[in-house]
Amino acid sequence: MKSKTMEEHKKTAPSMIRCAIITLSDSQSREYGTVERPPSTDTSGQLLYENLKEKYQLIGYKLIGDDPKSLISAVNEMIRKGAMVIFTTGGTGIGKRDITIETLRGLFEKELEGFGEIFRYESYRELGAGAILTRATAGIYKDSLIIALPGSPNAVKMGLNIILDELGHIIKHVMEHTKNR
């Protein structure tokens, strides 16, 4: 059953949303550095780029290594450029070099646990118990929404299917929170 309030919020949500993409990849960052458009070898970045540009304004893309300082710097750079939503892809596994979740959770003023819960549920439906390894999350930092997705193209597709239609609704709430400070 749909909520009438939620449907009303969606009707009054902003239509122009500025998005940015940050891909974390040690192997690719050395070869490409920072580019305006994801390189063809960044499949997940390309997926984000192609899906987001259809409906939203893309204001930045950055390809970085798996390094907490680089991630924090890239997030802050995208926020300075005006990003309302930042998608990260990669670095969400359980390996020693996977630092995305721990780094972002250290920044989040509010974590949106529901995104990760839904993502894991959908992963479980598709993959079975291996979904235990899935660490996608989302949160608010400096009045911007950050969505942390795994690096696999299938995970990016799943995350986009979950979040794309809700972006305006979430940003509406973020903007109201900002206005009430």
Image: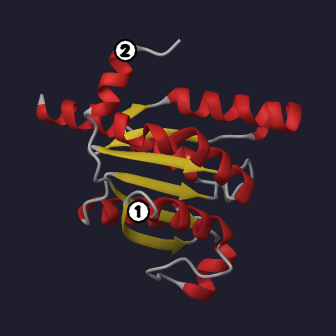
State the residue at coordinates (66%, 52%). Answer: 157
Distance, label 2 to label 1, CA atoms, is 31 Å
Q: Depth check: 116 or 95 in front?
A: 116
- Please say whether residue 181 is visible from this viewpoint: no
Residue 4's label in the rendered image is 2
Which amino acid lies under the numbered mark 2 shown in the image of this protein? Lys
Question: Residue 82, percent across and down?
Answer: 25, 60
Crowd rating for badge 2 (residues with CA inside 10 Å; few <14, some 14–19, many 20+): few
Vertical order, 81 against 5 (above or below): below
Residue drawn at (67%, 70%) of the image: 43
In this rendering, the answer to whether 15 lies above or below 49 is above
> Dot 1: what SS?
strand
Query: Which quarter shows the C terminus?
Result: top left
Density class for disc 1 (Cα within 10 Å; few <14, some 14-19, many ≥20) is many
Rendered image quadrant of residue 178: top left
Label 2 sits on a secondary structure element that is: helix
Q: Would you name the residue on which mark 1 appears?
A: 20
Task: Look at 67% across and 45% down and name the residue there.
Answer: 158
Task: Give percent across and percent down for residue 106.
Answer: 44, 42
- Single out the residue that lies furthest toward the bottom: 31
Question: Compared to 141, does 111 lie above or below?
Answer: above
**Between marks 2 and 1 in the image, the one whose residue lies nearer the viewer:** 2
How was the colour assigned to the protein in this rendering? secondary structure
Which amino acid type corresponds to the residue marked 1 in the rendered image? Answer: Ala
Residue 7 showing in the rendered view = yes
Quick one: 145 or 7, which is closer to the camera? 7
Question: 10 or 134: which is nearer to us?
Answer: 10
**In this picture, is 6 found above or below 136?**
above
Who comes first in sequence, dot 2 or dot 1?
2
- In the rendered image, residue 32, in percent from the top left (x then y), is placed at 57, 86
Q: Position of residue 30 (x, y in %)?
A: 61, 84
